[in-house]
Amino acid sequence: MKKVIIGTRGSDLALWQANYTKDRLAGIGIEAELKIIKTQGDKILNLRLDKLEGKGFFTKELEEELLNGSIDIAVHSHKDLPTTNPPGLIIAAVPEREDPSELLLILKDCVDISQKLSLKKGAMVGTSSNRRKAQLLALRPDLNIEDLRGNVPTRIQKLRDEDYDAILLAKAGVNRLNLDLSEFHVEVVDTTELVPAPAQGALAIQIRENDTELFNELQKINNAAVAEEIAVERKVLNLFEGGCHMPLGCFCKKEDDEFEVWTSKAESDEDFPDRLFLRAASTEGLAELIVSKFSEERKRPSKVFISREVGENSYFRKALEKQHIEIEGRSLIRTFPIVNVLDPFFLKNIDWIFFSSRNGVEYFFKLNPVLSKKVKFGVVGRGSEDSLRKFGHLADFVGEGGDILEVAEEFAKIADGETVMFPRAQDSLLTMQKYLTPQTKVVDLPIYETVVEDDIDGSSAEVLIFTSPSNVDAYFMENLLEPGQKVIAIGNSTGKKFDEMGVKYTLPYSPDEIGLAEAVFGIDMK
């Protein structure tokens, strides 16, 4: 096959992407050379991206050169592309996807690990993305978000120059450029916490539609699984008729033969985003289902009961109040400490301390433990992670998914052969402990007990959320489900209680406030 010409923007990241594609082509016997093309997005650096005319301001000129035949391939960051190709062009291949998470780079004197995302209160954060701004302000309404333009190295230099306290970037670009970030505090913001742009981390190899020979060759570097996942994300974007500046995040991944999709959508960069998580066996009709869940016509619950107190400024309360959903929050149990003093010798050879609940964190640190610097912390869920932050510690392992068995298996590999302490409730089911390897030493530390409140009244709310197995036991000692009531269970052990009762329930992906908000948003009332 003749030598092909790859069109690319001239930024460091665009050149990396083009050279990566050139190397992949060489691997299948195709020789290529690069041609650098300036785009509208490269030329206009004094305007916010959402103020630029039209869509595709990083791709239009490349596509024009492709159509007029001066290049054979255009390599794009997939997320920069409009959702429909110009007539005569197609996406021929999508290679492996880089990590689609976000990176928060923070100046070290602006770090406060007791705060969510380790940012000091009122910090100035740079980003040019409406999607990032809306989701960031939902997590941390105290932050000041300022516009940030330029390529990746330029943005990092602006942080270095202290124009900002922190900046938010796609992890994919930083990984590809192999940049040294040691001078900053780096927080990886997971896709389940801040939903990435559709197709973030993926490349698009675009060619002329009639170039059949090249299309057939490019199938050798096409990753069909990635293409299927990002097709869902981009279809959602297309159905919402959104461009690059729409505050929309969508991320799809296939896990154990099921597609898992997270979607975040706001009306503006300052609007609190609605969040949805869905699982589906196939991608057929999946994007349409996701979009239908955001319809104003959908009948949502008017009242939700949850078996714990909900703070006035909590993420969960704000998410529900935006949907005009009333919250009835009351704990059905009380907790009491059963250990008052901790022998420092008891902590001497501990490698890991693992918390499966916020209560475990709170009661453990009330004992004023003397810990060695080598101790690492594991937690289930971001709620426990946030509690740990309040005591000045960052989690080294965060079990994200709602499935505690998957979390247990993942942690077992990391802690293999080490000594793990579990500060826990007296009646804990010990799920994590059971999955550790025989070489791992377990130090069990029951530090609090739960007691059921007297005379618990039932709730007429359409949705009942239970935060622990003991709350389920407490509620159903004297109450029954009313017809039509839906149930959400936080965690497998809580869900098991409903399995025993033969009651259907929803299990949020994450056992935290975002996961709960996603689960409630996904419920349809008849």
Image (tube, helix red, strand yellow):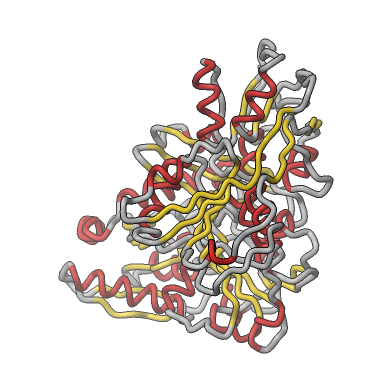
- Quarter of the image where the N terminus is located: bottom left
Above or below residue 122? Residue 236 is above
Tag count:
0
- Quarter of the image where the C terminus is located: top right
Image spot of residue 323 (x, y percent): 76, 36
Above or below residue 284? Residue 178 is below
Image spot of residue 494 (x, y percent): 56, 31
The residue closer to the viewer here, 328 or 365, is 365
Q: Quadrant of residue 489?
A: top right
The single residue placed furthest to the right in the displayed view is 312
Q: Residue at x 51, y 61 (%)?
A: 101
Image-based side of 494 in relation to 459, left or right: left
Image spot of residue 19 (x, y percent): 33, 77
Above or below residue 142? Residue 12 is below
Above or below residue 153? Residue 320 is above
The answer to whether residue 234 of the structure is visible from this angle is no
The answer to whether residue 355 of the structure is visible from this angle is yes
Q: Quadrant of residue 168?
A: bottom right
Q: Residue at x 52, y 54 (%)?
A: 354
The residue closer to the viewer here, 26 or 358, is 358
Q: Quadrant of residue 428?
A: top right
Q: Residue at x 51, y 34 (%)?
A: 492
The single residue placed furthest to the bottom in the displayed view is 161
Q: Residue at x 55, y 17 (%)?
A: 503
The single residue placed furthest to the top in the displayed view is 483
Image spot of residue 229 (x, y percent): 41, 47
The residue closer to the viewer here, 292 or 240, is 292
Image-based side of 311 in relation to 16, left or right: right
The residue closer to the viewer here, 247 or 185, is 185
